Amino acid sequence: MRRRPNYLAGLGSLVWLFLVGLPLYVMLAATLQSQSDYSENGPLSFPKHFTFSNYSQDFHNGFGHYFLNTLLVTLAVVAIVLALVPPLSYAIVRSRGRLTGAAFRVFLLGLAIPAQAVIVPMFYVISKAGLYDNLIGVILPTAAFSMPVCALVLTGVMRDITPDLYEAMAMDGAPPWRVFFQLVLPLSKGGLSTIVVFSALQAWNGFLFPLVLTQSDSSKVVTLGLYNFQTEHGIDIPGLLAAVVLSMLPIFIVYLFARRALVQGLMGVGGK
């Protein structure tokens, strides 16, 4: 039987493509023209004289330092999440005790508590710990607020591992640490990729914690560094959008390499 073409779905796809593609075109086109050309021709105009001076000017204004700070925060948050969440999820899945289940439910309360609700006590704790205006003071709360979602995702993935595999390794005399490293982690690659991308996004796009817990230029991250393009005389829109493009590249590259595992990990959130 011949399939009839779905014109309505095709029209909807074109509308969606236009709505997504137009902002991307405006952003990329603006980064390739000077501020005077952008002001004269408007945001929808195609660049007549291509220039990459906006990107070089961003690094001249300190964007490189903000980029390195953000990269450091992101790598540290991902490292903390990868060090703590997989063993925690494994203990939750394999433990039969009520205490573990209750602790997991309490841990998931972090999903219901927004960062805005605890930012004042968080500021007090970070200040008393001597970590104010320090990247460590941004890393720790960012990792803490990323862990509940990551634990939920990875627990759902680990529940999908067939119990027969656990029993087979137990019959071979494998200790729990060997089961964890040789069975659970290799079969949880999709979930691990998911929590890496999620925690990296939380750290890279974080704004509230860096805004409240840092002050000096030496501790600024990319999201705060974008403020430098707003002056009393106006906003350098091409330079600002060039900085936005540069800030998007690392997460976009991570997504390109991990997108397949990311989708598989999200499909296994609910367990069987």
Image (cartoon, rainbow, N blue to C red):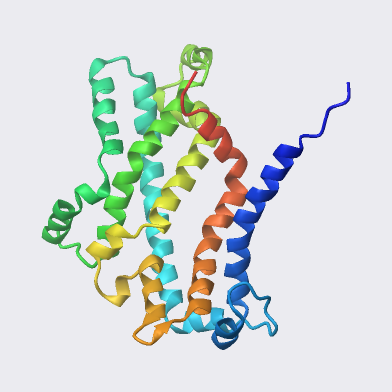
Picture quarter containing residue 225? bottom left
Q: Residue at x 33, y 19 (%)?
A: 95
Judging depth in this view, the residue of 65 and 272 nearest the camera is: 272
Q: Is residue 160 visible?
A: yes
Judging depth in this view, the residue of 60 and 94 nearest the camera is: 60
Residue 265, above or below 13: above
114 with respect to 149 (left or right): left
Residue 99, above or below 82: above
Q: Residue at x 81, y 34 (%)?
A: 5
147 with respect to 102 (left or right): right
- Residue farthest along the right direction in this orientation: 1
Q: Residue at x 55, y 83 (%)?
A: 39
Callout count: 0
Judging depth in this view, the residue of 28 and 4 nearest the camera is: 4
Residue 147, above or below 24: above
Q: Residue at x 47, y 81 (%)?
A: 236
Q: Is residue 178 visible?
A: no
- Residue 205 is situated, as x and y percent measured from the top left of the image, at 41, 57
257 with respect to 115 (left or right): right
- Residue 214 is situated, as x and y percent measured from the top left of the image, at 25, 67
Residue 247, above or below 51: above
Judging depth in this view, the residue of 168 and 46 nearest the camera is: 46
Picture quarter containing residue 133? bottom left
- Residue 215 is situated, as x and y percent measured from the top left of the image, at 24, 71
Q: Quadrant of the N terminus?
A: top right
